[in-house]
Image (cartoon, grey):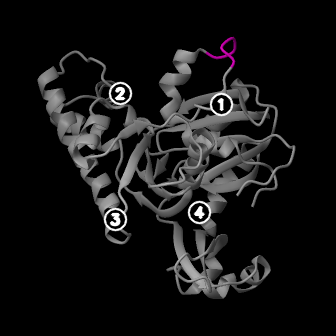
């Protein structure tokens, strides 16, 4: 999915709780960090991936870009949620050109929306290993009005949206650049956001399963607020391991444990669903990222429940970071929030 051109681009990931921005420069066969920034969004500005308060989102993006003095106007961004459908399908072997001319007809069988209402894209993965006369294809459809809302926000900021990606593909992009293609076995990637989790399963560097789960870190905040009577701000502090006056540490621990178990159950359900439809291969490792991944207990609870190693994904693992420009401790601390933005920053103007 990567085609190289020389124009600069900035990756901007609009989550439900914050906007993340990353700019990279290619150098010596790798990447060099040019800039990164994060800015919180007002509650309810984004609900279920849909933009509910576009003026607030515009203000946050504009202020973030201006405060970091970003020179390029070219943006790569991504979407996910109910308005995006990803299907892995099998079709008779055909060329890219033949696929382009027949994609709409083929898609009608797999997409539960009116074809006239969606933007379609595809990626040919190659011949099916069990039947060489067939090829595996990733089919993506996104509702036009949903995409147009995101495009309009960037245009209102004076920016040029050049690449519209999918969150889980951006996550895979960041992972493969930093960890290489895992030739054997199966690994899972989960970006745990405030309102949703993006799940990707890779086999030999190829995505074989993707899913969005509409549960995330907000569940922790809601439980803490409900059971401990705390404000949204205090709940966020407690969730990330901080201390708040009037919050009984024992009760906090109980609430976090319950919420973590619920979250881990959702993760296990998705991975079990993949395992049930796949061969007998075992998961080698789960890499987690996103705000929830930084919550105490999450990693340990997932490891105990799943029975295989779980690791925090570091999107800057193979990215050159100048310690004179960026505090390494800060980059390490915020790293789990940035994999989607890093994956987007690796795209190029002119990418499909």
- Mark closer to the chain start, 1 or 4: 4
Residue at the spot of label 2: 233
Q: Quadrant of residue 163?
A: bottom right
Callout 1 secondary element: strand
Q: Is disc 1 surrounded by few (<14), some (14 to 19) or many (20+) residues within 10 Å?
A: some
For this rendering, which residue is in front, 244 or 131? 131
Q: Is residue 166 visible?
A: yes
Q: Give how far apart the Cα atoms at labels 1 and 4 are.
A: 32 Å
Label disc, if present, on residue 319 of the rendered structure: 1
Callout 4 secondary element: helix
Left or right placement of residue 120 versus residue 112 in this view: right
Callout 3 secondary element: helix
- Mark closer to the chain start, 3 or 4: 4
On whether residue 325 falls in the magenta region, the answer is yes
Q: Give how far apart the Cα atoms at labels 1 and 2 are.
A: 33 Å
- Provide residue 104's location: percent of width, then percent of height: 66, 83
On whether residue 211 falls in the magenta region, the answer is no
Image height of 5 relative to 248, above or below:
below
Left or right placement of residue 231 versus residue 58 in this view: left
- Provide residue 9's location: percent of width, then percent of height: 77, 42
Q: Residue at x 48, y 23 (%)?
A: 333
Callout 2 secondary element: helix
- Mark closer to the chain start, 2 or 3: 2
Residue at the spot of label 4: 146
- Mark closer to the chain start, 3 or 1: 3
Q: Are marks 4 and 2 in contact (CB under 8 Å)?
A: no
Q: Give how far apart the Cα atoms at labels 4 and 2 are.
A: 30 Å
Label disc, if present, on residue 275 of the rendered structure: 3
Q: Could you tell me which quadrant the N terminus lies in?
A: bottom right
Boundaries of the magenta span: 322-326
């Amino acid at each position: 999915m990567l085609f190289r051109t020389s124009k600069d681009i900035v990756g901007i990931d609009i989550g439900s709780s914050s906007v993340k921005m990353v700019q990279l420069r290619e150098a010596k066969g790798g990447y060099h960090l040019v800039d990164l920034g994060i800015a919180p969004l007002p509650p309810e500005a984004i609900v279920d991936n849909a933009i509910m308060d576009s003026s607030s989102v515009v203000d946050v993006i504009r202020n973030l870009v201006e405060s970091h003095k970003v020179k390029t106007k070219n943006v790569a961004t991504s979407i996910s949620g109910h308005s995006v459908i990803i299907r892995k399908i099998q079709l008779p072997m055909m060329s890219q050109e033949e696929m382009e001319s027949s994609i709409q007809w083929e898609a009608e069988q797999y997409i539960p929306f009116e074809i006239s209402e969606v933007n379609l894209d595809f990626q040919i993965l190659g011949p099916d290993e069990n039947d060489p006369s067939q090829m595996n294809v990733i089919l993506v459809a996104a509702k036009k009005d949903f995409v147009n809302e995101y495009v309009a926000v960037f245009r209102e900021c004076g920016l040029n949206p050049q690449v519209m990606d999918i969150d889980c593909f951006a996550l895979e992009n960041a992972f493969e650049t930093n960890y290489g293609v895992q030739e054997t076995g199966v690994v899972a990637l989960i970006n745990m956001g405030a309102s949703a989790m993006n799940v990707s399963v890779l086999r030999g560097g190829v995505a074989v399963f993707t899913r969005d789960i509409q549960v995330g870190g907000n569940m922790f905040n809601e439980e803490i607020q409900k059971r401990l009577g705390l404000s949204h701000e205090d709940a966020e502090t407690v969730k990330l391991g901080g201390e708040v006056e009037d919050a009984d540490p024992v009760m906090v621990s109980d609430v976090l444990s319950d919420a973590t178990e619920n979250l881990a159950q959702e993760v296990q359900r998705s991975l079990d669903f993949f395992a049930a439809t796949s061969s007998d291969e075992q998961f080698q490792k789960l890499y987690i990222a996103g705000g929830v991944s930084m919550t105490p207990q999450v990693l340990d609870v997932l490891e105990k429940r799943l029975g295989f190693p779980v690791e925090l994904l570091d999107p800057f693992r193979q990215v050159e970071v100048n310690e004179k420009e960026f505090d390494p401790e800060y980059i390490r601390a915020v790293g789990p929030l940035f994999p989607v933005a890093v994956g987007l920053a690796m795209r190029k103007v002119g990418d499909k």
